[in-house]
């Protein structure tokens, strides 16, 4: 199935997907862009966090796609993504990934832009940037990261794509092939929600057809874009106080992962293989950095444990994760006892085992003295779930109230307090 232009793509799927009609006009203007800059694309990091010689990319991009329009396009795409079952609207994960992302944004050249980081339930090691500052992160990527500097390095790279306005520049440099890719990738997203046995086949055909028509031109540009994003991202990573070497170890695991995925992943994910040369070049560039040991915050470990559970969507999957954390605790192999206890407690809560969930949540709280709205919320949540009387439920609500006062800027803490008030029929207090 070869789709020749974006209008043909739109007309082909419009009868099947009503949501497409709302974006047909923009699509026909040729400005709906969905570009996923995968981690498998070439990355070359500079030696130190200094100003680098880059072209004036913002000006070049703005000639083709004004920032205001780029943001609107991103918002339209996000409307579609949020309807997808793979989108993960978990309050804890969103709060963590946005907090981490804005530590990087605040010291980057893009600090005046409005960013939004979101999670996708997918075991593949991947992250991607969309128009307008929307950055998606796969659950598998967070789980695979062994320290926060590795994860921050990936986010800094994606922030680099946004700050360099690569999507707008691609629109200007690839006017002919871009229309094909726009239609193919948009069709793939919409067809995946069309239902029936043909949805997956249609999505696969769209990607294969569109990429086959524009592959070489796409690669020639994206390699340059990846190198630019690396230089900008590395500066951002180090300036934000993270360990610039952390990404090296992560790329080693990506290389192993790419071999495992070979033959099974969509062709789009195999067009930019991770090479030994790329890893070696990055090691040479980062060798001049002074040694920096940065302890990971407790929330990094807690979120990794939480996402292991959320990545599963079945009762058996939650049981497997509960066994995983209990085995770690039994064999004393957990990198963080508090995180393993947290993961076991959260998995037990999903399995409707409130007593076991509370036991592990309290043990997790005892295992660390670190401040964490995420951990304190689980303690209150499991206390309420395991409560046998109104008095015990009241104690859990008071704990949630104290947590909301302790973490006034935390959506996790405040939203949980409101949730417990509603569950106890204290609706007016929840409104207040």
Image (cartoon, rainbow, N blue to C red):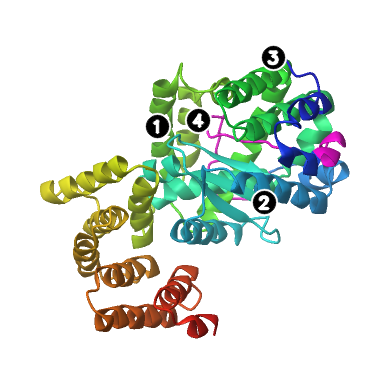
* In the image: residue 16, left or right of residue 334: right
Disc 4 to disc 3, how far (Cα)? Answer: 39 Å
Task: Say what secondary structure mark 4 lies in.
Answer: helix
Establish if 40 lies above or below 288: above
Disc 1 to disc 2, how far (Cα)? Answer: 28 Å
Q: Are marks 4 and 1 in contact (CB under 8 Å)?
A: no
Task: Look at the image and tell me in which quarter the N terminus lies.
Answer: top right
Disc 2 to disc 3, how far (Cα)? Answer: 32 Å
Task: Look at the image and tell me in which quarter the C terminus lies.
Answer: bottom right
> Which comes sooner in the sequence, label 4 or label 3?
3
Q: Which residue is mark 3?
A: 1
Residue 240 at x, y percent in the picture: 52, 58
**Nearest to viewer (mark 1 / mark 3):** 3
Residue, x 71% and y 48% (percent of image)? 74
Q: Which region shows up in magenta? A: 24-52
Judged from this view, the residue extending furthest toward the left is: 330
Circle on res. 281: 4
Q: Are marks 1 and 3 in contact (CB under 8 Å)?
A: no
Q: Which residue is mark 1?
A: 252
**Nearest to viewer (mark 2 / mark 3):** 3
**Nearest to viewer (mark 4 / mark 3):** 3
Task: Say what secondary structure mark 2 lies in.
Answer: loop
């Amino acid at each position: 199935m070869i789709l020749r232009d974006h209008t043909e793509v739109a007309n082909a799927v419009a009868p099947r997907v009503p949501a497409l009609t709302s974006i047909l006009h923009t699509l026909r203007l040729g400005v709906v862009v969905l570009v996923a800059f995968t981690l498998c694309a070439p990355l070359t990091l500079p030696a130190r966090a200094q100003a680098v010689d880059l072209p004036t990319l913002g000006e070049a991009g703005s000639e083709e796609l004004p920032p205001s329009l780029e943001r609107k396009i991103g918002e339209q795409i996000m409307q579609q993504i949020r309807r997808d079952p793979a989108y993960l609207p978990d309050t804890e994960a969103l709060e963590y990934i946005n907090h981490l992302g804005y530590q990087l944004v605040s010291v980057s050249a893009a600090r005046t832009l409005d960013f939004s980081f979101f999670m996708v339930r997918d075991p593949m090691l991947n992250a991607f940037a969309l128009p307008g500052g929307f950055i998606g992160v796969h659950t598998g990527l967070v789980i695979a990261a062994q320290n926060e500097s590795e994860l921050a390095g990936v986010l800094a790279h994606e922030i680099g794509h946004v700050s360099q306005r690569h999507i707008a520049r691609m629109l200007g440099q690839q006017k002919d092939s871009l229309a094909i890719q726009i239609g193919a990738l948009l069709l793939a997203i919409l067809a995946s929600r069309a239902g029936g046995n043909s949805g997956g086949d249609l999505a696969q055909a769209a990607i294969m057809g569109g990429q086959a028509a524009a592959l070489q031109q796409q690669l020639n540009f994206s390699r340059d874009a990846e190198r630019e994003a690396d230089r900008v991202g590395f500066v951002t990573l180090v300036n934000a106080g993270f360990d610039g070497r952390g990404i090296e170890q992560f790329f080693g695991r990506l290389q192993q992962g790419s071999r495992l995925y070979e033959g099974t992943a969509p062709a789009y994910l195999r067009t930019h293989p991770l090479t030994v040369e790329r890893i070696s070049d990055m090691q040479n560039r980062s060798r001049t950095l002074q040694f920096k040991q940065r302890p990971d915050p407790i929330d990094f470990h807690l979120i990794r444990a939480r996402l292991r559970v959320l990545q599963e969507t079945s009762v058996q999957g939650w049981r497997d994760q509960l066994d995983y954390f209990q085995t770690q605790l039994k064999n004393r192999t957990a990198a963080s006892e508090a995180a393993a206890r947290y993961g076991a407690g959260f998995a037990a809560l999903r399995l409707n085992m409130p007593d076991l969930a509370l036991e592990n949540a309290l043990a997790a709280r005892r295992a660390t003295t670190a401040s964490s709205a995420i951990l304190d919320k689980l303690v209150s949540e499991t206390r309420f779930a395991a409560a046998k009387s109104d008095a015990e439920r009241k104690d859990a609500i008071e704990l949630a109230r104290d947590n909301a006062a302790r973490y006034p800027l935390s959506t996790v803490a405040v939203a949980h307090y409101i949730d417990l008030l509603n569950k106890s029929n204290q609706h007016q207090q929840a409104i207040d």
